Image (cartoon, rainbow, N blue to C red):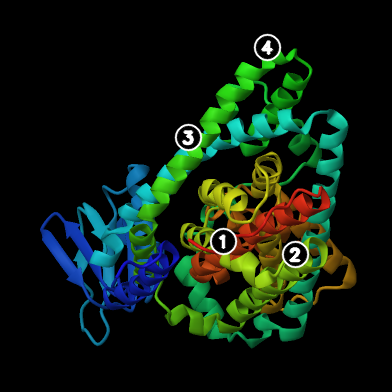
Amino acid sequence: MKFKLHTQILIGLVLGIAFGAIFRVDHHYLLIEHKNGTAEINSWSQVSFVIPVVSDGVKKDSAIKIYGENSQSGIIKYFESLKQKSLINDVKIIVKIPFANESPVYEGIKSVSRKSSIAAEIKPVGEVFIRLLNMIAVPLVLASLIVGAASLGNVKHLAKLGGKLLLLFAVTASISVALGQVMAVVIGPGNKMSTEAKAQLVESYRDEVSAPMDQNYKVDLIDFAVNIVPKNPFKGLAEGDFLQIVFFAILTGLVLCYLPPARSKPVIEFFDGITLAMIKMVEKIILFAPLAVFALIASTVAEFGFEILGTLLWYAITVIGALVIVGFGLYPALVKIFAKVNPVKFFLAQKQVLAVAFTTSSSSAALPVTIDVTENRLGVPNKIASFVIPIGTTINKDGTALYQAIAAIFIAQVYGFNLDLQQQLTIFIASVITGAATAPVAGAGLIMLVVVLNAVGLPLEGVALIIGVDRIINMCRTTVNVIGDTMASVVIAKSEGELGEIMTND
């Protein structure tokens, strides 16, 4: 019996979760390779990095970094940072073993690693899938947008379409962030975290958030607008800067409208051919999705586990609950009200899109599949889908904006900050803006969260509280971001009187 593709993807998802749960990465194990051999550490109460110093003529060991239990990731990353800075030669590692009388000391450290698992080792299979989709994204966006803009006919029509789109994005972003703030205040997830849990999370993930904390991230709206215009469009293409690609492609398409048909037709046909070729490539690559989904989910579960969800249960419930309301409540309502489309059909038609967005955690990786499904399943014509989806992928991130607002309030609650109305308004504005400015790649939302925290004066080390569940939250918010793009495509197409029949069969 041959299963349909969306069923195969679902099977891959379920089997991946089971496989990852069985073949977990052991987070209570360290493998230290040193000058006298290799040491396997199965448990520890404290790991100290020390260097010899001379004080009053006496040579002593001085600790430069101390880690407690459950800090495997921080220990390994700190060692790697010392190695990159060539500071590892004089460093010793002292390990305190529970119930042991002596603490072993290791010198001449060559490597510090953990025992991997087969579930984590198969991750490259999924990464190849993501790279294939990213490979298609840039030429597909460029070619389809040029053809789409050329088919719009004139600047007035483009401005009208763009105005509708930006208004829709602004309204949904505002509703999403406001909903997130209300839920965070009502549920109060940060008020439910114990002091011990807070200390443990900060200890475990402090080194993983050092990079965002060390840099002064800020969003300058003027620079943001100026940088949309590329100095070198080929550089924008090479770097995958979707805002610059969108600007250049739309401008090129509009200029083609003003050329004589004999001159513009060959150019339009050329880019239309590239679009068709990329769409066909997407259809072939997506056949690889079930295996890729299995590998990506298995490695995520193996690395992530489920224990930390217990510590951050109320935070996860708040974020995921708000995302569910937006993705499966607000968007279907807009589709029903403004596009007169059955929400069930709307979701059934894009099962592949949801699976790819969820497993890759990247809107840009899902973009080729999103355009393909939007045109061929949701009945949106190419000139609208090729215009709405790339712009939506770049600036329409309601899920990310919502998450940033909840995370900021959660961190404030944990640290005992009572946010007044002005600070809540600051979080609202900052979240809406940074949500739109966040790059459409995995993990970018965590970096932009620093901007929101800075805007309200909240402690940046609070990011360490939520980084443990960021991967699973990222998967959920990316899915909502992508649903928002397909919703916008359907609503805009209906407003233009060009929405075709939604197909739900594979």
User: x, y percentage for residue 106?
Assistant: 20, 62
- Residue type (three-letter) at the residue carrying disc 4: Arg
Q: Which amino acid does label 3 sit on?
A: Ala
Q: What residue type is labelled 1?
A: Gln
Direction front: furthest residue: 501
The residue pinned by badge 3 equals 277
- Residues 276 and 75: in front is 276
Q: Which residue is drawn at 48% across and 58% down?
A: 356
Horizontal side of 224 relative to 63 (left or right) equals right
Q: Residue at the location (31% across, 61% down)?
A: 61
Which mark is first along the chain, 1 or 2? 2
**In the rendered view of the protein, which quadrant contains the N terminus?**
bottom left
Q: Earlier in the sequence, mark 2 or mark 3?
A: 3
Quarter of the view holding residue 259? top right
- What label sits on residue 46 in the rendered view? none
Distance CA(mark 3)–CA(mark 1): 21 Å
User: Is any part of residue 457 visible from this angle?
Assistant: yes
**Residue ID for mark 1:** 350
Label 2, on which residue? 335
Q: Residues within 10 Å of mark 1 (few under 14, many from 20)?
A: many
Upstream in sequence: badge 4 or badge 1: 4
For the image shown, how many numbered marks are present on the structure? 4
Q: Where residue 263 is drawn, which disc sits there?
A: 4
SS at mark 2 in the image: helix
Could you classify mark 3 by the number of other residues whose Cα lies within 10 Å: few (under 14), some (14-19), or many (20 or more)?
some
